[in-house]
Each structure stands twice: as structure tokens, then as C-alpha cells.
Amino acid sequence: MTATKAPARPAPVTSPPGLAAARLLRLELRHNAMLWMMPVAVALFWVTAGRKIMATPPLWSLRAAGLQPNAVLAFASPVAGAAAWMGSRESRRRTTDLVNITARPRPVRLLATWAATTCWALVAYLVCVAVVYGVTAHQATWGGPLWWPALVAGASLPAVTALGFAAGALIPSRFTAPLVTIAAFFVLALSTQLIHGSQSYWQISPVVAAPWDIGPDPSAGTFYAYQPDLPLAQVMFLAGLTVAVLGALALPTGAGARSWRRSAMAVTAAGLLAAGTAVALAGTGRLDSHGMIAIPALHDAASDRPLRYTPVCSHTAIPVCLNPAYASYLPATEAALAPVLDQIAGLPGAPARISQAAVAYRQEPGNSVGFGLAGRAISGAPPVFHLLLPAELPGPAITTTEQASQVRSITGPNVIASVTGDGPGASQAQHAVTTALLMAARAVPSHLQPAGTPTASNSVAGPLPGVADGERYVGAAPGSPAYAAARRFATLPAAARRGWLVQHLAALRAGRIGLGQLP
Amino acid sequence: MTTDETRAAAATAPAAPPAATSRAAPATAAALGTLRRPRPPRAGARLVRLYATSRRVPAAVTAVAACAVVLRIALAGHWDTYGALQLPLVFETAAATAITVTVASPLGEPERLTGRWLPYLRLTVTLVLTGVAIGALAAAGTGAHLAGGTLDVLRNVAGITGIGLLCAAVINSGLAWIGPVAFLPPGAYALYTQWHHPALTTPWLWPGRPSRDLGAAICAGLVFAAGVAVITARGARDPAGERD
């Protein structure tokens, strides 16, 4: 018997796994429904969010906090629909049996399709973020982009595509894609209905960019650093959800080898664990005094320190200094307060500076949130009057004209009241002098203003801007003896009025001056 | 093609005798009327049943009923102003979308060429489903505070269904849901801007207008009429090689 050598079987031609995966992804990118859905998503974003965001004042906090929920809501429907459509492709085109015999296991094929869908969704989203942040960078006077809100909205897209894709792949039907899109909108838009207070598990929803009870906080990230506690939990939840859903795609029998299913089970469990942990963490959040949600397990105490900034100041008799983020409001604020400041400049006890302060928040029962100044309106040596700009209070954004009007009619009288000691328990003479100085300054008396700043946010009860508890202008009621005395005092020459105040202001503040002692 | 779909294709075809071949057709066209066999009893009902089955109408009716039930349950809960206003719109859109997806045909060109009753079937089924959706959602709001009331349901369901039907005719029957779904966020936003000005007041975004607003009703009605007309006359654009 002679042995013959058979020719060796040629080795199969294989390409590196990474290259093959990239090629598969490229094919999926070229044949993806999300590519055609991108204009729809961008148009929806612009109609429902872009215009609204760009109409807000150019503050990073407002623009970023507006971007997150609006982008999530605008993108959720088209992205979920496209993902469900792609997920049901094999069944719809009756190619399931055909592709099941290919070399790639089903989970890998599905993953490539999902990745392509997510890529296009992220591209569309990043275009929108680039426009909003680019314009804001051009308009903002101070600060930099807040990336966490943009990251949360971005992280919600893979989760939405994973959920939609899984629905399409597991329940392929002509009803799946439309119902998934509407369910996505319903869950995201109305999930916030369940939020009560700052310790709510539902804050994990990616449409929550700030404490839901107060809405967008204009002062976030201006006086104190933006707290990433809640965004961290949200990103963790979204990532966990994405991983869990993608892992679940490989769980059904027939999806692949047993080893694949075992790995998928582990991945799904890990994802669920991460998502559950994030929800639990969100439930431990509390509203901190700076108006942001602090989660003890994720909180960095170092971020509670005030931010350093160089204020921008006016050239009035008493300088008005604002946070540079609000520099665009300075001319209007200066013009509104100048007549009042001229009346009190140089008087004993008059503030040496009007300085913008941060809003202090406190959670109250239910969905109510209180906010105001942290301390007294006037303090320090030399005395500084702490001002809350109406524009930095939570609630609907206001125009520069509205802001100036509120400063003139509310803050101005309160600045004078802080010098004369006027307030609810003050003497008639103090009421009269305060009113007289306002008359001399031709400022609008605001004693008919209702207490509390009306806001459209959820049950937010707040103080008048620039007012601390117990320090509020009362003034003299028209027709009263104090009002008559005020008119008499206001008609004095400015020099005489000032001379009298320099001599008697301390006694007036102490309540030792009677109405009859006024000149 | 499933058994039901095959039957539907056969049932919607004209009742020509099997012997009538294409070669003989020109010559015998005039005589077909006399040769036609008498229609079996209840053939019309069978035709409608098979058409409805092929279009997944029972599933659509189930989806509409589910929308009504969930809306009813949701209305029993506590909602703030935003939620109370937007809630009905979400379910109206879902119901309209369910109607829209029934226009997709799994049979494609053969049925289109042979089914002379198709326009009537499309018209009837669309109108009946729209009526069922309006009735179900209005009934769900009975005894509860349904924002906008029945008139809002009527206008919104009809208008959004019209958008879906137009999309089915223009884009693709499988992707007809894009129209209603894309209309939902601007519609909800139009409701939102009633509180947060500047308000979107165009009647083409009818969900944001009051229920008795004539302009909005006309716009929604026009869209519905256009959608029904196009679907009745032309049918949906069915993608080749795809089903369900």
C-alpha cells in the first residue's frame, strides 16, 4: 500500500471580526429608516423646542434646561418609530429564514441594525445641540455650556431606539411601530405627572432637567456650580435600560447558541441592576438651597462652594453690581434704580452697593417650593443691599422691559425702605419718609402690589424680588396723615430734605421720630 | 400570502368564469354579463369579512377599544392642566393611527388590478373605523372630564386620520403612521402654548384651537375629506415585497 498525500484543504478566507462588523454597520447605515426620519425629527425639534429655547434669555442654565426635555420629547416619537420599523424588517420582508443561515448570529445582526439607527438619531440630535449651543455661545455674556443636560437627552436616544427596536423585533406587526411611537410620547410627556416633591423616583425620567416643581431655574450654574447628581442617575438609568433591552433581544430560544443566551442573560441582569439602582438613587434626592437636586450618594460637597466671578457694575450714585451672566440686564436695571439711588446715596446707613444675590430654595409640603433671599436684604460693613433680579427667579421668562418695570416698582421702594427702616411694624413717620423719597424720585409707589410673586410654575409661592422676610415697603396710604406728610416732605428742596435726613435718619430708623416732627 | 389573504384576493376579484382567458377576453367582454354566474348568497358579507381580515381591521378595532379603555382609566386619575389637555390628544392620535395602518394591502398589485369593489370597501371601512374610534373615545369621556369634549374628539380623530390616509397614499402604506405621529408633538405643543405665549394659533394645528373653532374644524375636515378621497380612489402605496 502506498500512501499518497492529498492536497491540503485551503483555509477559509476570513476577514478580521472588527472589519466585518464595521462593514455590516456601514451597510445598515446606508439602508436605515432613521436616515429618512432625520428631517422629521429635526423639524419637530425646531417647531416644538428650537423656537421656544431660542426665545429664552441667553443664559446657559435656561437654554440647557430647556434643551433636555424638549429634545427628548421631540426625538422620542420619530426615533422610536424608526427603530421599531427597523426591528420588524426581517419579518416584514420575510427574510428571517434567509438571514438565519448566514454566518452572523441573530443578536449580532440585530445589534448592527440598532447601532445604525441610533447613530443616525444621534447625528440628528447633535446637529440640533450644535445649533442651540452655538447660538447661545454667541449670545451669552458669561459662563459656558452645561453639558449634562445635553448628555442626558443624548443618552435617552439609545434607550428609546433599543425599546422601539426590541418591540419591532419581538412583536412584528403593522401596529407595532405606530403604537410604540405614541407610547413613547405618552410615557415621556406625562410621566412627570407622578412627581411629588423633590424625593420622587419619577425624577429619573429624562425629561426632568431641574426640580420639576419649580421648572427651569435661570440661576442654576451662575452663582453655584451645576449639580450633576440627577443627570448622573438619569444617565445610569438610561444606560442600564439600553443594555438590558439589548440583552433581552438575545434571550429568546433560537436567537443564538446557548453561550450567547447565557451572556445575554448576564448583560440583561447587569443592565436591570444599574437601572434599578439609578431609580433608587433618584428617590433619595432632595432640593438643595441652590435650586438643584442633590443625591447624597452621588453628591460632591466641593461643588457647593460659590462660583468665583467678577461682577459687572453700573456707574450710578450707588453701584449696582450683577453677575456677569446677567450683564445684558444691567443697563435696564441701572436706569430703573438710578432715580431712587440718587435720593439715598451718601445717607448714613445707605448701602454702599446694590449686589445681585443667589436665590435660596426650600422644599415645602407637596409640590410647593419656597424661594427668596438667604439672609437679610441689607447687611455687611459697608452695607450691601442684596438684590434678586426678577429674571433670575423661577417661572416664565420675562422680557427686559418687564424686568425693568418690576425692578422700578418693587425693588426701588424696597431699597429706600431698607434705609428708612420701613416695613409692616414701622412708624407712620417712616412710612411717610419712604413715600416722600419715592415721590421725589418719581418712582412708582408699589404699596398696592400684592404680596408674592406670581409665577406660572407648579404651586411656587415666592417673595417679592429683592425682599427678605420682614423687610417690605409699606408706604403711606393715599389720604392718610402720613401721605399728606410725605407730600409735604417731598416738596422740600433736595438739599433741605437731604440735610434733614442726614441729621435724623438714625432716630427715624429707631422709631423715635413722630409724624408731626417731619418738616 | 396567508390563506385568508388568498381568499381575499379571490373574493375581491370580479366573478368571471374560470374559462375566460385573456385571449378570449376582448371578444367575449360584452357577453360576460350574460355568462356571469349568479352571485352566491351572502357574497357581499364574505367579501367585506375577507377584506377586513386582510387589512387587520379586527386588530385595529381592538386597538381603538384599548385606547378608549385606557383613556377611561386615565381620566379617573388626577392630572394637572397640561396632562388633562394632552391626554385625549394622545389617545385620539393612537386611534387615528390604528385606522391609518389598515389601508395597507398585503396583496398588492393583483388585488388592485382585479378588485373592482376595492374603492367601495376602502371607503366603507375607513368611514366605519373612524366612526367607531370617535364613538369609543367619546364614550370613554362620558361622565368624566374629557378636555374639549366630543367635538374635540370628532375633529381631532377625523383630521389626524386624514393626515395618515394622505401619508399612506403619498409615502407608503407601511409608513403611513409617520404623519399622525409627527403631528402629535406639534399638536401637544399648540395646546401648551395656550399658557406659554406666543401661542400657535394657526387652524392647521387644530388640537390647539377651541373645540368650537370653525377654522380648525374646516381644516381638519378638509384634511379628512382629502385623505378619504385619495384612499378611496387610488388606494395606498404598497411597498413591493413587504407584508404586515
Image: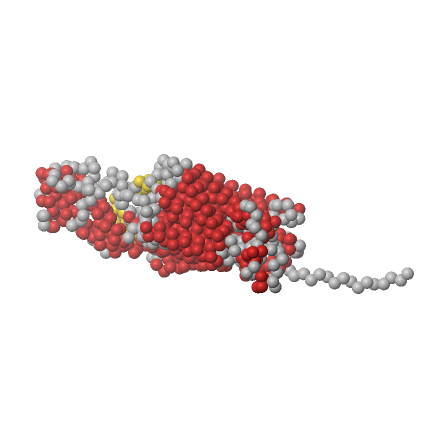
- Tell me how the rendering is colored: secondary structure
- Residue B113 in the image, given as x and y percentages of width and height: 54, 59
Q: Is A333 rendered above or below residue B146?
A: below
Using the image as rendered, state which of residue A290 and residue B140 is in the foreground.
B140
| Residue drawn at x 36%, y 45% as measured from the top left | B151
Q: Quadrant of residue B242?
A: bottom right
| Residue drawn at x 14%, y 49% as measured from the top left | A440
Q: Is A459 rendered above or below residue B5?
A: above
Using the image as rendered, state which of residue A32 and residue A217 is in the foreground.
A32
| Residue drawn at x 17%, y 41% as measured from the top left | A475
Q: Is residue A119 visible?
A: no
Indicate the quadrant containing the N terminus of chain A: top left, top right, bottom left or bottom right. bottom right
Q: Is A403 rendered above or below residue A474?
A: below
- Residue A498 in the image, given as x and y percentages of width and height: 13, 48
Q: Quadrant of residue A273?
A: top right
- Residue A284 in the image, given as x and y percentages of width and height: 45, 39
- Residue B117 in the image, given as x and y percentages of width and height: 51, 53
Q: In the drawing, does residue A91 fall left or right of residue A331?
A: right
Indicate the quadrant containing the C terminus of chain A: top left, top right, bottom left or bottom right. top left
Q: In the drawing, does residue A473 fall left or right of residue A198?
A: left
Q: In the drawing, does residue B241 fall left or right of residue B194?
A: right
| Residue drawn at x 42%, y 39% as measured from the top left | B140
The total number of labels drawn is 0
Using the image as rendered, state which of residue A270 and residue A48 is in the foreground.
A48
Using the image as rendered, state which of residue A44 and residue A247 is in the foreground.
A44
Q: Is residue A476 visible?
A: yes
